[in-house]
Image (cartoon, rainbow, N blue to C red):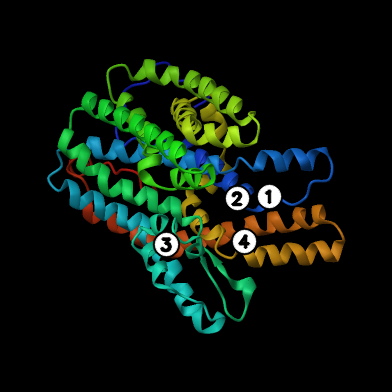
Amino acid sequence: MSSTQRYFAPIDFKTRFPALDGLRALAITMVFARHYGGGAHGGLLLRLFNDVRTYGWIGVDLFFVLSGFLITGILYDTQADSKYFKRFFARRAFRILPVFYIVFVILLLLTPIFKYEWRWGHLTFALYLGNIFANFDLSLYGIFSANHPTATVSISHFWSLCVEEQFYLLWPLVVWFIRDRIRLIQVAAALSVVAVALRFAMLGHFPLEIAAYWSFRNLPFRMDSLLIGAILALVLRGPNADRWQRSSKWFFLLASAGVAAIFMLPGQAAVYWVNAIGLTLLALASAGLIGSTLRSGSPAFRLFYYKPLRILGKYSYGFYVYHLLFAKAWLGFLIFLAAKFHSLAIAGLIALPFNFAITFIVSKLSYDLIEVRFLRLKRHFEYDSELVEHKHAFTTK
């Protein structure tokens, strides 16, 4: 793997790309830093870190593009399968649902202790519709404790899981109905343009704060991020896969330059243009990064093939689900350390790595003790091509 692969052949869903786990590690680290990295502003390095970590939400966009890439590859390659829908949805359920619903079970068990104040609106998250209903009531993103405020639970990050699950329910129908690779690319591109148009319409008819919130957390406005990943999967399955893969680095560099230019705009202008076209540019940059990572021996491959990153990436789904749940408790721990050491910077240097390590351990235990048991059930839903070739598809994504 030290030398760069000369020719990049068209891919299929049974090909394993281990460096993609490294990309997942990057995405989850960015999200973690966004949620927990703020507070200390003293000194140049701390100010620089705080400025950079505010853009950690980009990690969610990277997850979106990666999901669109992997899921579309599976759907396109298995569209002729004898049990296309049954096998796809069963395998998705074994990967996604256990961790998600275990969280709700644990919270219900903790309710008598912490007196959690459940409302009917919280049920919409269990149905993967919470991102829609929470637009009308932001308090649904929290499950409040009546007797221990620091035990209040945050599910504000579940909006992205809702967006992805809605995509997983709808996109298989489109792929199955259209089938043709070129037409699918055209449809994905057209729908991406629709998403941009919808964001412009929202920004043009509502106050910026409301428009930005709605356009950021709902599938019709965010489908371009998933669909650009889908387009990448489809072009890399065609006869010009090598050329498209080699072009990936330029998509990454040019789109990243466009994003950086938008980020440099002042205040409200930056917010407006990020939501208008910046999200699409981020998706293009993410697709370029993913495409660059696929070629063995490339600089991106060597970076994201680094073993610690691959290990973290393996547990990234559970890490994402668990990391923000008890954010108030972690904030309380940070405040306690700051008072003890009379320094928020020192408190952060202790609390953040400790928080990260604990979340990683919980995620690993969750995967090894629970998730893997459900993943093994995928063998009962193997695709026709797997049964013939005895070659299994992705087990973790």
Image position, residue 291 (x, y; %): 43, 27
Q: Which mark is residue 99?
A: 3
Q: Which mark is residue 184?
A: none
- Within-10-Å neighbours for mark 4: few <14, some 14–19, many 20+: some
Q: Which mark is residue 358?
A: 4
Image position, residue 101 (x, y; %): 39, 66
Dot 3 or dot 4, earlier in sequence: 3
Q: Quadrant of residue 332?
A: bottom right
Residue 3 visible here: no
Helix, strand, or loop for circle 1? loop
How many numbered marks have been drawn onto this rendered protein structure?
Answer: 4
Would you place residue 304 above or below residue 40 in this image?
above
- Within-10-Å neighbours for mark 1: few <14, some 14–19, many 20+: many
**Residue at the spot of label 1:** 37
Point out the residue furthest to the right here.
342
Q: Are marks 4 and 2 in contact (CB under 8 Å)?
A: no
**Residue at the spot of label 2:** 32
- Residue in view at x 53 percent, y 42 percent: 208
Closer mark to the observer between disc 4 and disc 2: 2
Dot 2 or dot 3, earlier in sequence: 2
